[in-house]
Image (cartoon, rainbow, N blue to C red):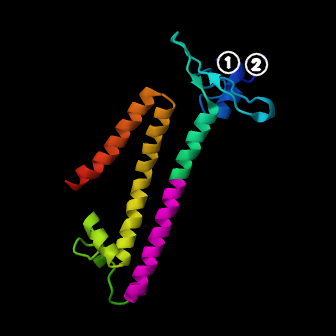
Amino acid sequence: MAHPPDIPDSGAAGGAAGGAATGGGSPGSGSPGSGATGGGPGGAVTARPEVTTSGHHPRVIDEAKIRAMEMTISWVLRIGVVTSVLILAAGLGLMFSRHPQYMALSGSFSYHSLTKVTSRFPHSIGGMSHALAKGEGRGVIVLGLLVLLATPVLRVAVGVINFAYEKDPPMTIVTLYVLLVLVGSFFIGNA
């Protein structure tokens, strides 16, 4: 039996359409999130009440908000990775232009010397800032790696903001906890 697109169906009839459209539940599972979402005229996605069994007032899920959140997170990740790759490439180009001996694949130069603690690669934010001020490729490479490490942290921060905007306290609290653990791990790692 077919239902109008904006009426949820917790049974198997709407499970295949809703599960595939929203990623929630599996086809025919009847789990929350597997209700029919469909679309209005012209394929427009509409808001629908969440299927609840607790007897509380159902929360309205706005599919457009969810899609906007997913796109925001996707763009944060893409921009972070592309930016870090560009910075790393610039740093490698700068480093190889100033140190042509690094280009040789054979000879007396050992690449292990670049990864030792005693190497001239910056091992702190202050060292990176000093290397950047001198225009060294090593500092630019470390900056690129720092941007790459900051990308997933920024993704979680965007998640906190999005869940707070959606007025979803449990997810806001959980995501904020994950953000605090991530940021705290950087400081604990330096101790």
Query: Given the current orientation, which residue lies at the most extreme left position?
Result: 191
Query: Given the current orientation, which residue lies at the most extreme top position?
Result: 55
Percent x, y of residue 86: 50, 68
Residue 9 numbered tag: 1
Percent x, y of residue 152: 43, 50
Query: From the viewer's perspective, is 71 left or right of 127?
Result: right
Question: Which secondary structure lies at badge 1?
Answer: loop
Vertical position of residue 3 compared to residue 37: above or below = above
Residue 3 numbered tag: 2
Q: Is residue 64 visible?
A: yes
Which amino acid type is shown beneath numbered disc 1?
Asp
Give residue 190's quadrant in the image. Answer: bottom left
Q: How crowded is mark 1: few (under 14 residues within 10 Å), some or many (20 or more)?
A: many
Give residue 57's quadrant in the image. Answer: top right
Vertical position of residue 55 compared to residue 39: above or below = above
Task: Specify whether residue 87 is painted magenta.
Answer: yes
Q: How crowded is mark 2: few (under 14 residues within 10 Å), some or many (20 or more)?
A: few
Percent x, y of residue 124: 26, 65
Please report the residue visible at 58 percent of the width from the left and 35 percent of the height from the top. 66
Find the magenta span and give its range: 77-104
Query: Given the current orientation, which residue lies at the most extreme right position?
Result: 42
Looking at the image, do the residues carrying marks 2 and 1 touch, with CB atoms under 8 Å apart?
yes
Task: Specify whether residue 187 is painted magenta.
Answer: no
Q: Earlier in the sequence, mark 2 or mark 1?
A: 2
